[in-house]
Image (cartoon, rainbow, N blue to C red):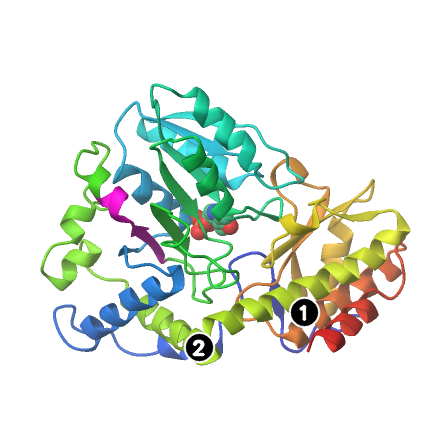
Amino acid sequence: MTLRNGKEFLMIPGPTSVPDDVLRAMHRPAVDIYEGPLVETTAFCMDGIRRLFRTKGRPYIYAANGHGAWDAALSNTLSRGDKVLVLESGRFAIGWGEAGEIAGLSMEILKGEWHKPVDPAAVENRLKQDRGGEIKAVLVVQVDTASGAWNDIAAIRKAMDAAGHEALLMVDTIASLGCMPFEMDDWGVDVALTGAQKGLMTPPGLSFVVAGKRATKAHATANLRTNYMDWTFRDGPEHYHKYCGTPPEHLLFAFRAALELIDAEGLENVWHRHALLAEATRKAIDVWAEGGVLEMNITEQTGRSDSVTVVRLRNVDPAPLRAFTKDVCGVTIGGAIGELSGKGIRIGHMGHVNAVMLLGTLSAIELGLAKLDIPHGKGGVQAAIDYLGGAL
Ligand SMILES: *Cc1c(COP(=O)(O)O)cnc(C)c1O
């Protein structure tokens, strides 16, 4: 017996649910790439990217996923043999550093734990030891999608300043932009990047990189540049320069529609919605944790992301629970990855998510826990409801 017929929910940490308005925006013929609606859409998107990152920096749009944005950030600013310091708080910053190694950079990992965010004091200490200025860039993710950690970017910038270090600060906001506060200029971020398919509610295939002033300056001497990623070419006068060829037209129309949805709600209201839904999720997990099996992966309360929640299951295989929510209830939740592979679940609550989707997801999980006899405290969903009732 299944109860899955009806609207299916995709509650994984990306790609995420695409709003109907965004899907509809793509249902149109291709258009001229030299003039007309596409040129105006590009201007709208460039402006929207600046508003999302809160920056006056230079945005670049790539027909690529997040991995492409990683390459773009590194190749435009660094040179062969340069060292990057990768701040570990899960899987993703390390993946970015590994991409740099393939391109000819050398990577040093500042060891971190999978159950807490980056420690800014450790960053300061490491940079203070680098008297020769060998480290050219610090790579960090705002949210690590594998661990659920929320890194304090402003504090990391302060730590770099306290060390008096010149390295560029590069931040991956793929799992956080459009979900949680990010202030590129106020926080002194030199390069910021994101993908379209998570908080930004757009089908996968677009990513964005913004260059701050110091990054633009570093670009002038970088020797890892490649034709497709190159900022110099993309700064050219023609519209097609901005895409180094044919623009990903339909994805741009989709992204524009997503920006309009964010504008209509108000970016700060979007952040607030994410904060409430994330806290409701955590309230449910706190109750389920009383059974001694489930636990929040991130131990410190302040280090927990508002876009994805990672839950560990002690000595219980999470696969049957995920299969139950999907096959019986119609909601897909994520499995844990990396070091936590096979040991937990990831609940994505980012982008086009409302209370119905979140409470429905939590209910399906609680039903699954009961049906599969996984020990858990009863009333997790009620705790989420009580929290939202008090917060609204
Ligand atoms: C999803 C994700 C990526 C990878 O993005 P792709 O679009 O899959 O290449 C990188 N960093 C973070 C933090 C992510 O969440």
x%, y% of residue 72?
30, 44
Task: Report whether 386 appears left or right of 218.
Answer: right
In this view of the protein, which residue sits in the foreground, 321 or 5? 321
In this view of the protein, which residue sits in the foreground, 220 or 45? 220
Q: Which mark is residue 261?
A: 2
Mark 2–mark 1 distance (CA, rounded to whole Å): 19 Å
Query: Tag 1: Cα neighbours inside 10 Å, few (<14), some, or many (≥20)?
Result: many
The residue range painted magenta reads: 206-216
x%, y% of residue 324?
76, 60
Q: Which amino acid is tagged 2?
A: Leu
x%, y% of residue 305?
60, 54
- Can residue 226 be seen here? The reply is no
Q: Residue at x 15, y 60 (%)?
A: 240
Q: Which mark is residue 334?
A: none
Instruction: Say if the magenta span includes residue 210.
Output: yes
Residue, far left: 237
x%, y% of residue 55?
33, 59
Q: Which amino acid is tagged 1?
A: Leu
Instruction: Say if the magenta span includes residue 126.
Output: no
Q: Quadrant of the C terminus?
A: bottom right
Q: Residue at x 83, y 71 (%)?
A: 382
Task: Report whether 124 appears left or right of 78.
Answer: right
SS for dot 1? helix
Q: Looking at the image, is 100 positioned above or below residue 184? A: above
Q: Quadrant of the N terminus?
A: bottom right
Q: Quadrant of residue 283?
A: bottom right
Residue at numbered disc 1: 358
Q: Is mark 2 within 8 Å of ligand 1?
A: no
Q: Looking at the image, is 302 positioned above or below residue 361? A: above
In this view of the protein, which residue sits in the foreground, 26 or 134? 134
Q: Residue at x 23, y 62 (%)?
A: 247
